[in-house]
Image (spheres, grey):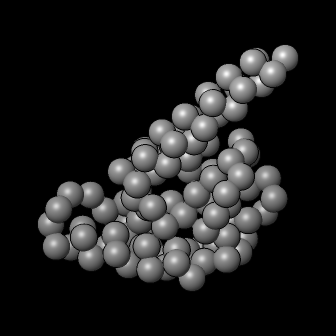
Amino acid sequence: MAWRRAVWDSDGWREWAACQEAEPAIFFASGSAPEAIEATSSAKAMCACCPVAEECLVFAVTTNQDHGVWGGLDEEERREVRRAWRRASRRAGSATRVAS
C-alpha cells in the first residue's frame, strides 16, 4: 500500500463508502464489554466489503485518527500501521540523504 498524505475526501471516496448509512456508534465503540466487541466486529465486517476501505485507512493513518474503526482497523491496529509507516518514511529519507 502506498502511503500518501490524505486530504479529507479529496477524491470523493466517501461517496462510495459502505458505512454511509450505518450507525456511527458501531465504529466508535470502546472498551471490552461484549457489546463493544460485537460493534467493533460489525464495523470491521462492513469495512471488509467496502470498495474504499484503503482510502479510508490512508486517511485515518495520515491524519492520526485516534478513535474508532477506519478502513477495517481499530485504534491499536492503526497505531502499529502508523509506526511501520513512520519507520519506512525515515528509512526512505535516510536512503535519499545517503544517495545524495
Above or below — where is 60 with respect to 50?
above
Whether residue 13 is visible here, answered yes or no, is yes
Instruction: Say whether residue 75 is left or right of residue 10.
Output: left
Above or below — where is 49 with respect to 92?
below
Q: In which quadrant is the N terminus drawn? A: bottom right
The residue lying furthest to the right in this view is 100
Q: In which quadrant is the C terminus drawn? A: top right
Above or below — where is 6 with respect to 72?
above
Q: Position of residue 17 (x, y in %)?
A: 64, 73
Residue visible at 61% across and 28% down in the picture: 90
Q: Position of residue 30 (x, y in %)?
A: 27, 57
Residue visible at 20% across and 57% down in the picture: 31
Above or below — where is 49 with respect to 8?
below
Q: Position of residue 99 (x, y in %)?
A: 81, 22
Residue visible at 34% across and 75% down in the picture: 41
Q: How many marks?
A: 0
Instruction: Say whether residue 39 is left or right of residue 10.
Output: left
Residue visible at 16% across and 73% down in the picture: 34
The residue lying furthest to the left in this view is 33
Whether residue 21 is visible here, answered yes or no, is no
Instruction: Say whether residue 95 is left or right of residue 64.
Output: right
Q: Quadrant of residue 45?
A: bottom left
Instruction: Say whether residue 41 is left or right of residue 49.
Output: left
Q: Position of residue 8 (x, y in %)?
A: 70, 49
